[in-house]
Amino acid sequence: MEKDVYILGIETSCDETSISIVKNGCEDVYTCVSTQMDTHANFGGVVPEIASRMHTENITFVLEDVMENSGVTWDMIDAIAVTYAPGLMGCLLVGIEFAKTLSLLYDKPLIGVHHIAGHIYANNLVEPITFPSLGLVISGGHTELVLMKGDYDFEVLGSTLDDAIGECFDKIARIIGLKYPGGPNIEKHAKEGKPSYEMPIPMNDDSLNFSYSGLKSYIINLVHNETQRGNEINPYDLARSFQDVAVDELVRKTRLAIERYSAKNMIVAGGVSASEYIREELKKLCDEYDVHLSIPPRKYCTDNGTMIAAAAYPLFMRGQFSDYSLNAKSHEYFFDKKD
């Protein structure tokens, strides 16, 4: 009988300090997340210097919690995994240096994991990813449709040409006057609003690419012009109008991909997949085409060490380890673009 593999995953790419132990790439043994959300809400967004400092302060306490409550000893752990890209440079460095120290101290292999790989492999925490699968990656920095042929074998079918959908949600929230984090607050307001504002359809073509900068600019100009005229903006109706159009385009492009590639399996990954409205709309779409849909629970959609440990498992099985020259990269494209 093969030995179980326990991987300790560390995530510090932005404003969550998280460490987790995952068994065989699919079982969350124990996860601890220390969030900085309330601190950064005072500034309307993440302040990198404050975030990295708070990671430094919190990371040892997070590790202590995991090792005291997981029931796993250091002898049982097979590897240390850590996010190395993309993210805030100072934040990434805290996690990487901490991971290197643990790797050296306990003589465990080190595995560098790309943050987007983490979001994708969070689906394995629910059920094994079935290949081939259509993947929709939606986050603050990504909006991509990818064809997943196997472990770490992806082909980009379409991507955003400018703003990612999560970034657009956050910026529109600030324009409307909603607090950080923007996405969840847009969704809350949209539930109480009506689609009373006419919106342009973003990237209204038959490609599988996305574009949200035009929609963002339209709303900025709309709010500015109405304010100049002395007219009051209804934040609930504007949130609803924006969300409907933004998500409709997301669903429309996904529909095109399902049809063109005869997809039978689909996964959704990234922080924006925590949106209840987006989950509902994608489920309707997949039900219509009899496509099996996999979306992680919301606790695995936002940043966490669990997804990093899960994404490290295929690399561990290949013996694909990192050395101590592993460094942080604030920007690194994960997928190979289609020719």
Image (cartoon, rainbow, N blue to C red):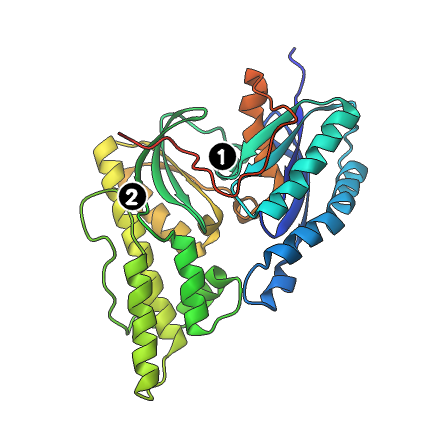
Secondary element under disc 1, as helix, strand or loop, is helix
Q: Quadrant of the C terminus?
A: top left
Residue at x 54% of width, y 23% of height: 314
Crowding at mark 2 (Cα within 10 Å: few <14, some 14-19, many 20+): many
Which of the 4 image quarters holds residue 226? bottom left
Identify whether 277 is placed above or below 240.
above
Q: Amino acid at mark 2?
A: Thr
Query: In front here: 246 or 324?
Result: 324
Q: Which residue does the numbered mark 2 point to in the structure image?
A: 254
Q: Work out whether residue 161 or residue 128 is closer to the camera in this orientation and state it.
A: 161
Answer left or right for 131 relative to 36: left
- Image quarter in which the N terminus is found: top right
Q: Give the percent coordinates (x, y) of residue 204.
A: 20, 53
Which mark, residue 233?
none
Question: What distance separates the C-alpha of mark 2 from that of mark 1?
Answer: 20 Å
Residue that sits furthest to the left in the current view: 206
Q: Residues within 10 Å of mark 1 (few under 14, many from 20)?
A: many
Q: Is residue 332 above or below residue 4?
A: below
Residue kind at label 1, given as amino acid type? Ala
What residue is disc 1 on?
A: 117
